[in-house]
Amino acid sequence: MNLVSLLRLLPLILSPSLLYPVESRGGEKDPLLHPLSGLAHHTYVRTGKRLLEEQSQKRVDLAKGYMSNSDLEKAMKDFTQRCGNISRMYRIGKSVKGVPLWVIEISDNPGKEEAEPAFKYIGNVHGDEPVGRELLMRLANWICDNYPKDPLAELIVDKVHLHILPSMNPDGFSLRKRGNANDIDLNRDFPDQFFSVNNEMGRRQPETRAIMNWLRDIRFTASASLHGGALVANYPWDGTEDRRRSYFPCPDDETFRFMASIYSRSHHNMSLSKEFEGGITNGAAWYPIYGAMQDWNYIHADCFELTLEVSDNKWPPANELPTIWEHNRKSMLNLISSVAKTGIHGKIFSSETGRPLPGSVMIKGINHTVKAGRAFADYHRLLAPAEKYEVMATMTGYKSKTTIIRLEAGPMALDFILDPEVSNGEHRLESVCDCSCTTGGSGLEVMGFLWNSHLEVYFVLVIVLAFVCILLLRKRARLSFLRHSRQQGGGPKRAVVA
């Protein structure tokens, strides 16, 4: 081979795609990992195989057989008309080009806050991965068609609030590209725990802001986003502190592995993967990315989110969609129902008033706190089955309470009744003293005489009265709890009060 031939081959030899082989999470590898790509927010590396696939797909109409954005909106409106008794449609924001981001909620009481876990599915995060938007509409229609005759559909409608956003990136879909209309990868646009490259609110994309505001309005227990280009259930963390590829577990690693396995094992063949053991992977162990949506969900919204790769082909022919749906249907349904069928669920009450307290629940050894809701003080804490968990409930102004449980395959109802840091008896004793000090001189002398003469008797009476009041209030709190439990009905069978 002569010198001229070698020079012609040099660009190919030094090609980044050959030096750094790329896996496919949503189709691309993050630029921050690549020493030749800099920090460009939307510069990606592709393998030769991926380029050939994309070039061949450009020769045909990719969208043939897929719903357009207007078709999708019409399908959602038709659905809420057909299934209006269990659904509603609402908007969480708009895309760069002003396309509404529509959501369907499915519940026996849509639009009403209840002491039930909420789950969300998001599709089409990347514009060139449209399978998710099609699967999510099929999911909604399956639930409507099978409620209440199918037990799984009945459980989801009656015990979960399901929210479906079929397309987070309608502009990218229209443009047939990964990023949004500003060419930004929306799954790299969230605030990151390790690097502040995209922490400026003014530069955040409208689609990203819509998701963040959505999670401030609704307290989701768990969620998943649907992607294409591989077949695996991905869980946090997505990034590492040193940007190196390595397994980087979050505090709830066991729980996330459990959730990912629910999806993988219910899938037609995901768990049989030769590339990913059990069909699941830690994000950073696959390849690190930064500004990912699932990490932000867990850190800032107590929402346990998975990133699901549901199709080896990012944009398969539309005639393959029925098969892809059948392969993923059971997994999608089981993941939703898991928020009601596993973990611990309950409320936090005040022993003083019997009213709900919006406190927090912590697990010893897991550095992550789950907050109870304000309206009902209900919490839904996802956990993998285990021999023992030490669970603690806390609330400002109240004494924390801890109990040890054994969590089996099913859910457990665990309520907490917290005592105030200062008892009623102490409050009453202080009020007697305060009142006596503000009376006139003659009254003060009489009270002083009575107090000095019968100090021991009064003290015993106050203690007895305080004790009786505490017992009555505790009884009222327990009755209130039982009344709430009967109103909810059908929840976890094993009820525990701490």
Image (tube, helix red, strand yellow):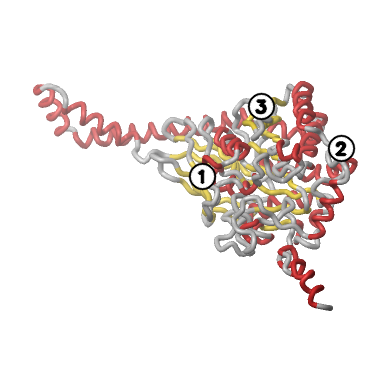
Q: In the rendered image, which residue does mark 2 sit on?
A: 64
- Asked whether disc 2 touches disc 3, contact meaning CB atoms under 8 Å apart, the reply is no
Q: Nearer the viewer, residue 88 or 50?
A: 50
Q: Residues within 10 Å of mark 1 (few under 14, many from 20)?
A: few
Which residue occupies 44% across, 45% down?
400
Q: In the rendered image, which residue does mark 1 sit on?
A: 200
Image quadrant where residue 133 sits: top right
Q: Earlier in the sequence, mark 2 or mark 1?
A: 2
The answer to whether 35 is drawn above or below residue 316 in the figure is below
Q: Position of residue 454 (x, y in %)?
A: 18, 33
Q: In the rendered image, which residue does mark 3 sit on?
A: 90
Residue 228 image label: none
Q: Is residue 179 left or right of residue 472?
A: right
Image quadrant where residue 381 sits: top right
Nearer the observer: mark 3 or 1; the answer is: 1
Q: CA distance from mark 2 to mark 1?
A: 38 Å
Q: Position of residue 181 (x, y in %)?
A: 67, 39
Element assignment for label 2: loop
The amino acid pointed to by label 1 is Glu
Q: Is residue 96 visible?
A: yes
Q: Earlier in the sequence, mark 3 or mark 1?
A: 3
The answer to whether 443 is drawn above or below residue 16 in the figure is above
Which residue occupies 66% across, 46% down?
185
The amino acid pointed to by label 2 is Lys
Element assignment for label 3: strand
Q: Position of residue 51 (x, y in %)?
A: 80, 55
Q: Is residue 201 left or right of residue 320?
A: left
Q: Nearer the viewer, residue 314 or 431?
A: 314
The answer to whether 90 is drawn above or below residue 20 in the figure is above
